[in-house]
Image (tube, grey):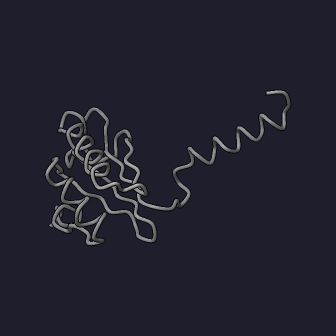
Amino acid sequence: MKSLAELAKIREETLKKVDIRKERKGTRIVVGMATCGISAGARPILTALLEEVNKRNLGDVEVTQTGCIGICQLEPIIEVYKEGEGKVTYVDMNAEKARRVIAEHIVNGKIVSEFTIGAYEK
């Protein structure tokens, strides 16, 4: 780095990469990995999601982790942000349910309603 202009360019590029609030192309799946999520079994879910995305070569799908989502009693939780759709929150998940979410929601575009927070509340 030799100038302030170079530093400003690096800063701008980095901010673009880390700003998750901006709408992005593709799909982002977020797994709650705070202590509450991990103790409820989130780690095998994260692994299952990553394996399924890789197995199906879903290049436009990003699986990430976050801290506490705020509803610990419903952990493990995953949130799906699919381009052009609202956020879908899946609760009380396990690895098999996560694989089904990939197959039905991510690949085929059909939300798995019985796993959503709305279905849980009923």
Q: Quadrant of residue 97?
A: bottom left
User: In terms of depth relative to the viewer, which is nearer, 60 or 96?
Assistant: 60
User: Looking at the rendering, in which quadrant would you find the N terminus?
Assistant: top right
User: Percent position (x, y) of residue 83?
Assistant: 45, 66
Tell me if residue 122 comes above or below residue 13 in the rendering.
Answer: below
User: In terms of depth relative to the viewer, which is nearer, 43 or 115?
Assistant: 43
Question: In this view, which residue lies farthest toward the top?
Answer: 2
User: In terms of depth relative to the viewer, which is nearer, 36 or 90?
Assistant: 90
Residue visible at 30% across and 45% down in the picture: 50
Residue visible at 52% across and 50% down in the picture: 20
User: Looking at the rendering, in which quadrant would you find the C terminus?
Assistant: bottom left
User: Percent position (x, y) of residue 29?
Assistant: 36, 53
Tell me if residue 97 comes above or below residue 12 in the rendering.
Answer: below
Number of on-image labels? 0
Tell me if residue 40 comes above or below residue 96 in the rendering.
Answer: above
User: Percent position (x, y) of residue 49?
Assistant: 27, 48
Residue 38 shown left or right of residue 23 in the figure: left
Residue 50 shown left or right of residue 62 in the figure: left
Residue visible at 22% across and 45% down in the picture: 48
Residue 100 shown left or right of residue 108 in the figure: left
Q: Quadrant of residue 18?
A: top right
User: Percent position (x, y) of residue 41?
Assistant: 18, 38
Residue visible at 23% across and 60% down in the picture: 101
User: In terms of depth relative to the viewer, which is nearer, 77 or 55?
Assistant: 55
